[in-house]
Amino acid sequence: MNARASTKETALRAFGRGDIWVKLSALVWGAGCFARGQIAKGMLLCLEEAAFVLGIGLTWPFLMKLATLGTVQAERIWDPVTRRNVWNDYDNSFLILLFGVIALLLIGGFLVQCVRMMRHARRSQQRVQAGHALPRLREDAARYLGQDFHRTLLFFPVSGVTLVMILPLIVMILIAFTNYDRNHLVPTNLFTWVGLDNFRLLTDLTGSGAFAHAFPRVLGWTLLWAVTATLSCYFGGILLAMLVNHQRTIAKPFWRTCFMIAMAVPQFVSLLLVRNLFADVGIINTLCKQWGVTDWLYQIGAIPTANVIPFLTHPSWAKPMILLINFWVGVPYQMLIATGILLNIPHELTEAARIDGAGGLQVFRHITLPYLLHITGPSLISGMVNNVNNFNVIWLLSRDVYVTTDQLMAQAGATEVDLLVTWLYRLTQDQSNYKMASVIGILVFVVCSTLTLVAFGRLTGRGREEAFH
Amino acid sequence: MKRYGVLLLLLMLLTGCTPGTVEENASIPLRVWVGDNADVAWMEQVVRDFTAANPQRQYAIQIGVQNEGDVSKIILADVESAADVFTFADDQLNDLLIGGALMPIAEGAEAVAAANIPASVEAATGPDGLLYAYPATADNGYFLFYNSAYITPGDAATLESLLVRAAENGRKIAFPMANAWYLYSFFRGAGLEMQLSEDGVTNTCNWNAADTPITGVDVLSALLEIAAHPGFIEADSDAFVAGIKDGSIIAGVSGTWNASVAAQVWGEHYAAAKLPTYRVKEQQVQMASFSGFKLVGVNAYSAHAGDAMDLAAFMTGYDAQVDRFTMRRQGPSNTAALSSSEVQSEPAIAAIVAQSPYADVQRVGSKYWDAAAALGKIIVSGNPGKTDLQTLLDNCVAGITAPADQ
C-alpha cells in the first residue's frame, strides 16, 4: 500500500490499524515523529500542542461561564485610607462571550489537529513499513517553501480573517440571543441568554408591538429604496452617457468633465451641502417663499404648513427628495461606466441593424441594452446590495432633521426614511440597544444574500455567456 | 529568492508592533474631559491652579474634549477606559447611574451640597439619595429672549401677545416644539406630569389624563392652535440661529448657546425673561421648563478615584466657577459666585433665575424622547392624519411609559 492510498483511510480506521505510536500521537502530537526518529519535528509539534493547550487553559474559565454569561455582579467599596475604589472579582459578560467563543474555536482547532496528527503518524508508519525514507525537517521546510508554498502564504490571511472577521461576526450574531442593551451594559451589569425573545419582538403584535410595527415598514422602504435608487442611477447614467456620446453632441469632453467634477467632490460634502440647501430654513425654501411657490403649494394642499416646504422633514416629501438627491449624486459614476461600455459595442452590430432598417429605439432595446446588461449585470446586483446598506445618503440627509410623526415607529427608534442599516445605527448609537441591532444586522444579511442569490441566478443564467460571442 | 522575501515581509507585518517601553513615573495620571473646545483654556487655568494648590503631589493631567450633551454614550461604550473626571449635562445622570459609571462623592459631599444652589444639588443626587456629581454651572436650562425693538416686556408676559406682535410685524416667535425637551414645558405648565418611575428606568406620565382640571386634550388643542398661528414657527437650533440672523425671528425659547447669538445680532435690543404664560381652557398658565446643570462626575472605575475627586471638587469650586463665568459667561451653580452683582446683571442668568420657580430637575427615562418628539412633530404638522386627540395622547403616553427593554 502506498502513502497516497492511505490518505483515504478514515481517521477511525487509522486509529484502529495504527501502532501504539499512532494511537499515542492523538494525545501527544509529536509521539509519531519521535518513534520514527524525527526528533526536531516532534518537538515542534509538541510545542504547537502546548500553545493550543495554553490558549485553551487561559480561556477555559470564560468557557465555563459561557452558559450563564457570568453571575458575579460588580461591586465597589471605597477605601478611605488608600483613597481608591476596591472592586470585587466581577464577571464581564462581554468578555465571557468573546473569550468563550475563542475557547470553542481553539478546542475545535485542537480536535481537528489531533485527528490530523494521528493520520500523519499513520502515514509515516505506512511509509516506514513500505521501506520509504521519511522526509527530514529540512525537506519538510523546503516543501512549505516549494510545492506547498500556497499553504505558507495562506496561513497569514486565514489567521487574520479568523481573528478580525469570523470571530467578531460570531460574537455579534450571538448578541442577538442575549439581552445586551442599555440596562445591561458591561462591566457594571451582566447580560444573559434570552433565546429567541428578540426575534419575537419583531413579529409579536401583542404588547406595545413597536418593533413589529416598525420592522415591515423599514424593510419595505429599504427594498423600495434599493431597487429605485439602483435602477434610476443605472438607466439615468446610460441615457446620459448616450446623450453625451451622441454624434450630434458638440464639445463632448466638456460635458463629460462637467459631470465628473460632481464625482470629484467627496460624497458626504455634497450631501451635507444639499441637505442645507433643502433645509426648512435653507436657500431653496427662502427662494420658494419669495417667488410664491410655497403659498401656491399650500393652497393646493401639497404641504401641511404655510411657512416651509418640508423637503426633508415630511415623509411624502423626504422619500422622493432623497431618491432624487441620490440620483444626482450617483448618476455621474454610472455615466462613466456606461460610456466605457458604449464605446466597446462593436460598430458592425449597430450598423448592420441600421441597414436592416432598425430605428434608434430598436437598436437600443435589442442591442445596446442587452449588451450593457450582460456586462454590468453583476455590478447592478452589487449596486443594489450596496444600496440596501447605503448608510451615507440616508443618514447625512435625515440626521437631526427628520422627526417621525409615526408614534409607534418613534417608540422603536425608527423613522419612515430609515433603512435597516441606519435604524441599526440609531439603535446602537442613540439607545445602546445592541441586542436589537444585532437582530437587525442578521436580517440585513438575509436580505442582501437573498437579493444576491436570486439576482445572480437570473442574470448569469445558462446560455447567456454565449449571447455575444 | 523571492519567496523568502515574501515570507520576510509577512513576518515583519506580524511583528510590526513592538511593545513600547513603559516609563516609570511617580506622577499621578488623570484624564479629564471638558464639554467644548472653548473650555480648554479655562481648564488649563484650573489645572495650573490645582497643581499649584497641591505642591506635595505630582500630577500628569491630560485634558480632552467630549461634548457634554452626549458624553454618556462614549463613557458607557467603554467605561473602563473613559476619563477619570468628566463634565456632563445633568439629563444623563440617570443613564450614567444605570451604567455604573459614576461613583458617589465619598469625601466632602455635605460641603458640596452646602455651597451650591439646592436645585443643582438635587440634579446631582441619585435615587438612593447620594450625591453622584459636582454641580458646575446652573444655566443649562431654557428661557425666553426677545428683540425689544418689536416687543415690550409687557408683550413678553404671554405667548398670545408675543404671537400677535410677531404676526403684526410679519415676523416669527420661535419654539422648538418638535423637541421633547421643550414640549414638556406646556404639559407641565398645565399641571400634567411626566417623570422617572421609582424603578429608575421607566417613566410615569399622565399627559392623556381626562380627569385633571386641565386635560391633556385641552393642552393639545391649545398647542395645535399655537402651532397654526401665523406668528409661530417651529425651529430647531440651526433654524433658530438662521432666523435670528436674517431678522425673521424676533423672539424665541432656547438656551444660552443661542441667546449669545441673539445678543450679538440684536445688540442693545436684546432682552431675556422667564417663559411666558399661555392660554389653555380659557385661562393663562405659566409655562414650566426643565432646569439644566452641567455636572462634573468621577469615573467609578478610575484607578485614582481619590485624586480624581480632588480635581473634580477643585474644578467646580468657587474660584473655578468665577473663572468660568469670566472666561465663558457660564452661570455658576455656586451660591456665592451666583450672588455677585456682575453675574446677576447678565440677562440670561437673570432670566433663568426668574424661571427657576417653574423649572423641574430633569429626571426622565430614555423612552420619553422619541415618543414626545413624535407628538411634537404631529402638532407642528397640524395633525395631518386628523387623528383623535385623545388617541394621539394615549399613543404618546404608551410610548413614554413603555418598558425600557424593548
Image (cartoon, rainbow, N blue to C red):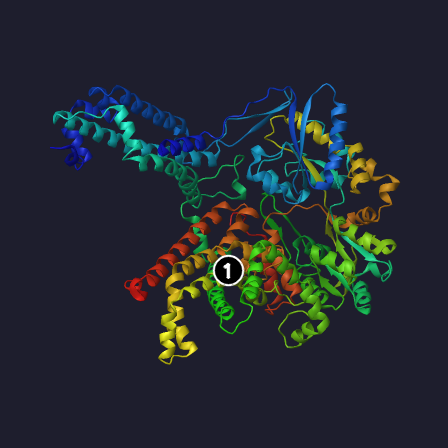
Q: Is residue B361 above or below residue A252?
A: above
Q: Position of residue B25 (x, y in %)?
A: 63, 20
Q: Is residue A387 above or below residue A284?
A: above
Question: Is any atom of residue A29 visible in this view?
Answer: no
> 10 Å neighbourhood of mark 1: few (<14), some, or many (≥20)?
some
Q: Is residue A116 left or right of residue A199?
A: left
Residue at the image position 61 percent from the left and 70 percent from the top:
B386
In the picture, the quarter occupied by the N terminus of chain A is top left
Secondary structure of residue under mark 1: helix
Q: Position of residue A380 (x, y in %)?
A: 42, 61
- Return the residue nearer the eye: A7 or A421: A7
Q: Quadrant of residue B8?
A: top left
Question: Is any atom of residue B113 visible in this view?
Answer: yes
Q: Position of residue B65 (x, y in %)?
A: 66, 39
Q: Quadrant of residue A457?
A: bottom left
Q: Quadrant of residue B21?
A: top right
Count of numbered tags? 1
Q: Is residue A122 above or below residue A203?
A: above
Chain letter behind tag 1: A
In the picture, the quarter occupied by the C terminus of chain A is bottom left
Q: Position of residue B220 (x, y in %)?
A: 67, 63
Q: Is residue B12 left or right of residue A410?
A: left
- Return the residue nearer the eye: B310 or B204: B310
Task: Residue under label 1, please give it.
Answer: A333
Q: Amino acid at mark 1?
A: Tyr
- Return the residue nearer the eye: A216 or A220: A220
